[in-house]
Image: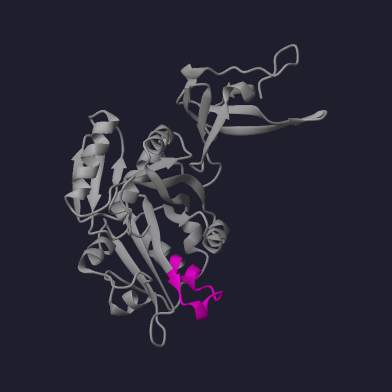
Amino acid sequence: MEISAAGRLEVRITAADVGKRVSVRRLSEAGGSLEKFTDTVGVLTSWTDGVLLITRKSGETVRVAESALVAGKVVPPAPARRRGPAATYEELARVAARAWPPVEEERLGEWRLRAAGGFTRRANSALPLGDPGLPLDDALSAVRRWYGARGLPAYVQAATGAEGTEERLCAELERRGWVREVSAEVWTGGLAPVADLAEGAGVVLSRDADEAWLARYQRKGVSDVALRVLGGGPSVWFATVPGADAPAAIGRCVVDGRWASFAAVEVDAAQRRRGLATAVMAALAGRALEEGASAAWLQVETDNAGARALYAGMGFAAHHAYHHYREPSDAATAAP
């Protein structure tokens, strides 16, 4: 917190600092002889009518009354990660979009409107990667019309927590009543350490998701559209550990330049804690290394404690969070 030369806490931010990363301390409780304070760090997304809105790295929006401010200052962007591959948000967003491609895509300025028959939110949401070329309300109206014409609810995927992410857009969506339904994180790490974790013995690699692989995949009733999404990407590999009736474990990897993405890593509940997920990822990582990749990324939902522990043990760490916002008036049934 900012302390003056006289030793007093000072508020050194104004409404002109909207859009910057700030650290504030506010009075949260007073009574008796003690005062309690709460500190918040995030992007200042608005300051109107005596209320500050600060969006944290997780995407959570914190309301702070101006009258409760005790101290505040602008702080530098979150420090660069000390391990793993360096990457900008935009680079990862574009790589992730290629790794899980929609069946249909249209541009709205620098936004991408993506549709795949409702199979996953990622393939059925608008991806803002710059200026939509319209005022925001007009752009959102265009998004709703585009998805409505396809019988789909309108979603916008927006990110928080890294330099260049979209905290202000998230705040504007929430202000307009868009509902945040699902949040996840993108984690990055080195590829070679994953390949070194296990020999990958017993893992079969294929260019196609065959019936056995799909029998283990948790999204039942996979349609032709879903198969097009799963099989799309620059260089796609599917991993299978054979089992009695269905594979004991599966995984999917997409190699795209220096990046390899991991997804659909699933293990039979009766076969867990045998290192099968590690074996699948090691085999896929080895193949990606052969194709010239050196860095890896994956996404994990914020409440999946088991997966987060597994990936952290492999050297992955969170890069940014992303969120799917649904238009105010329609229910959505697409999976994350």
Which sits in the foreground, 332 or 306?
332
* Residue displayed at 22% across by 34% down: 109
Q: Do we see residue 132 in this rendering?
A: no
What number of labels is visible? Answer: 0
Instruction: Name the residue nearer the viewer: 93 or 147.
Output: 147
Residue 90 image position (x, y, % from top left)? 36, 39
Residue 302 sits inside the magenta stretch: no
User: Which stretch appears magenta?
Assistant: 266-281
Q: Position of residue 16 (x, y in %)?
A: 47, 17
Residue 322: horizontal and vertical position, in percent? 42, 46
Q: Quadrant of the N terminus?
A: top right
Q: Is residue 305 above or below residue 95?
A: below
Residue 189 left/right relative to 72: left
| 165 with respect to 152 (left or right) | right
Identify the image quadrant of residue 13: top right
State the image quarter where residue 130 is shown.
Answer: top left
Asked which quadrant contains residue 37, the reply is: top right
Taking the spot 81% from the left edge, 30% from the top edge, the residue there is 32
Q: Point out the residue furthest to the top here.
A: 6
126, above or below 313, in the image: above
Q: Residue furthest bottom?
A: 244
Q: How is the image coloured?
A: one colour
> Where does the image place residue 328, in percent across and percent down from the top left?
34, 44
